[in-house]
Image: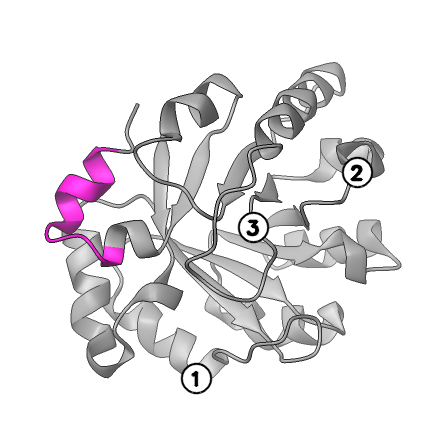
Amino acid sequence: MLVAPSILSANFGKLDSEIKAICDAECDFVHIDVMDGHFVPNLTIGPVVVDAVKKVATKPLDIHLMVENNTFFVELFSHIKPKFLSFHIEEEKHPHRLIQKIKSYGIGAGIVLNPHTKVDEIEYLLEDLDLVLLMSVNPGFGGQSFISSVLEKSQKLKELIVKRNSKALIEVDGGVNDKNIKALKNAGVDIVVAGNYVFSANSYKDAINSLRV
C-alpha cells in the first residue's frame, strides 16, 4: 500500500518541518487538498503555498482539486508539476478534454468521485486516467468518519479498470486508519490518503508503516 499523508491535518504554523517529517518518515506522496470555498464549504491553499511545499518536499506531490472552474485551477497549478492532479467529475462538463490538458503538462491525470457518485460514470475515461480517487468521506473537512460503502465501490472500479485495460491506480481518501486498511487493500486500493491518522500520531513513521499492508 502506498501512503499519501494529507497536509490538511498538518500544523500550518510549522508547515516546513511537518513536510520534512512525513518525507523523512518515508511517505510515498504528499497529498494537498485545494478547496475554493464554492465546490466545498472550506477554503485552503493556493499555488504560493504549494510552491513552498514543493521546495521542502522530497516526495512527489498529489494535488486534489475541490473547486469550481477546474480548467482555471489546472492552469494555475500546472507549473508545479505534481505527480498527480485530480479533479471532481461532479464539477466537470468536459472531463476528457481536461484530462488531456493535464497530461499535456506532463502530469498524471486523476478523477475524483464523491461518495454518492457511481464508478460507471467514468468507465469510458479509464484508459486515459492515471488515478481514480474515491472519497470515503464527504469532501471539505478532515477528521470525518469512514464511509464503508467505498469498499464495494473500489472492488467494482477495479473490475472496470481490468475490463478497460487501464493502468489507473485507485486511491481512497477519508477516515483511513489501521482498523480499515486491510479491507481497503482487499478491495483493490493502491494508495491511501491519511491526514488525522498520521499527523495526530506520536510517530509519523509508525503511523505510515501501520498502513503498509
Residue 41 location (% of width, % of height): 62, 76
Residue density around tag 2, few if under 14, some if 14–19, many if 20 or more, within 10 Å? many
User: Residue 210's image quarter?
Assistant: top left
Q: In this rendered view, identify the residue nearer to me: 86 or 108.
A: 86
Q: Give the SS element for disc 3.
A: loop
For image coordinates 54% across by 70% down, the residue present is 34
Q: Which amino acid does label 1 sit on?
A: Val
What's the distance in space between the residues labelled 1 and 2, CA to CA? Answer: 32 Å
Query: Is 57 placed left or right of 112 in the picture?
Result: left
Residue 102 location (% of width, % of height): 66, 57
| Figure quadrant of the N terminus | top left
Numbered label tally: 3
Q: Which amino acid does label 2 sit on?
A: Ile
Q: What residue type is labelled 3?
A: Val
Mark 1 vs mark 3, foreground winner is 3
What's the distance in space between the residues labelled 3 and 2, CA to CA? Answer: 19 Å
Q: Residue 48 carries which label?
A: 1
Residue at the disc numbered 3: 137
Q: Is residue 126 above or below residue 176?
A: above
Q: In this view, does 185 lie above or below 42?
A: above
Residue 207 within the segment the image draws in magenta: yes
Q: How is the image coloured?
A: one colour
- In magenta, the rendered stretch is 199-210
Residue at the disc numbered 2: 122
Residue density around tag 3, few if under 14, some if 14–19, many if 20 or more, within 10 Å? many
For image coordinates 21% across by 55% down, the residue present is 22
Query: Is 99 placed left or right of 18 in the picture?
Result: right
Residue 1 within the segment the image draws in magenta: no
